[in-house]
Amino acid sequence: MSTFISEPGTKLGGRYRLEDRLAAAAGWSAWKAIDETLARPVTVLTFAAGFPRIAEVVTAARAASRLPDSRLARVFDVEDDWDHAYVVMEWASGDTLADLLTGGMDLTGGARIVAEAASALASAHAAGLAHLCLTPDSLRWTPGSGLKITGLGVDAALAGITADNPELADTAALGRLLYASLTGLWPGGDYPSLPPAPTAEGQLRRPRQVRAGVPAALDEVACQALSLPGTAGDALTTPAQLATALHTAIPAVPVPPAAAPTRRDAAARQPPDNYWQRENAGGGRPDSWGADR
């Protein structure tokens, strides 16, 4: 029996118990499952018998499993039997970028997440891997654990998506995420969680034309990543270039000034009234000084 039609409760590989179907398309399903051996949640992909891209998905999953970057959701296990194939991946908790944007996240915070994503994808491209399917749902964020990018290589293999220039394709996708972070609007095409960005004569309006308060430097980086006409600098064509540009453009977090000392603080730093008398008389700090305090 193909694992694609398995029901909740089905156990794969003697340890991965399927719980909830998260998504499904022609020939594959994504599940939340429990790894009963390690008692942890995982994401499991299963496939219908004869799904034509099983080999591509398995190859992409194995390649992703070798990347050490903790910001990229890990691949734990792969079964490549044609009739019973599955892929087990890290369960990425936290809010998606789409959740954060619809919840009113400040634009600088969104830009910082995209900068971190660009840095993580730069490391993936250095190892020869690309994402090619980045959306706001691909990025998850938790205050304690930070960024997690899901679907590296695997989502593109599921959909049969390729690119002649993978670095350029991922940079443009990151540019769209940055635009959405700055404006709360989605640049190009329909996206269910965000309203579409406005255009003028077939071109996207710059972020600063759409939302007041967007810093000029971040506006320029978004336009460079999306290759919009009228930008002052050269187009950004790799995730590494975008990461560098964003880290330069994002305003530094100000360090709060130290509070002025109060009279109580000053008094607490003064030695006892009889300390100097004892120092002069006894030639050193007496053992009983702590008790006197």
Image (spheres, helix red, strand yellow):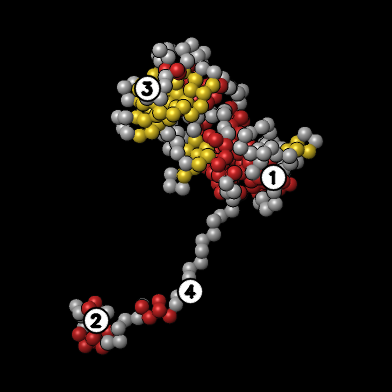
Please identify, in this view, whether the residue under mark 2 or under mark 3 is nearer the observer: 3
Q: Disc 1 and disc 3: Cα gap in Å?
A: 48 Å
**Residue 207, label in figure:** 1
Q: Give the amino acid at mark 1.
A: Pro
Residue 123 visible at all? no
Quarter of the image where the C terminus is located: bottom left
The foreground one among 120 and 184 is 184
**Residue 172, label in figure:** none
| Residue named by callout 4 | 260
Q: Position of residue 150 (x, y in %)?
A: 49, 33
Q: Tell me what residue is drawn at x 22 percent, y 78 percent.
A: 291
Quarter of the image where the N terminus is located: top left
**Residue 292, label in figure:** 2
Q: Give the amino acid at mark 4.
A: Ala
Q: Position of residue 143 (x, y in %)?
A: 46, 48
Q: Where is residue 258 in the image (x, y as percent from the top left)?
A: 48, 68
Q: Tell me what residue is drawn at x 52 percent, y 31 percent.
A: 125
Q: Disc 2 and disc 3: Cα gap in Å?
A: 71 Å
Is disc 4 surrounded by few (<14), some (14 to 19) or many (20+) residues within 10 Å? few
Disc with the residue nearer the chain's start (1 vs 4): 1
Q: In the rendered view, would you say 161 is above or below 210? A: above
Is disc 1 surrounded by few (<14), some (14 to 19) or many (20+) residues within 10 Å? many
| Residue named by callout 3 | 10
Q: Disc 1 and disc 2: Cα gap in Å?
A: 65 Å
Q: Disc 1 and disc 4: Cα gap in Å?
A: 40 Å
Disc with the residue nearer the chain's start (2 vs 3): 3
Residue 213 visible at all? yes
> In the picture provided, is 76 more to the left or to the right than 174?
left
Give yes or no for contact between labels 1 and 2 (Cβ–Cβ under 8 Å). Answer: no
Disc with the residue nearer the chain's start (3 vs 4): 3
> In the picture provided, is 112 more to the left or to the right than 61?
right
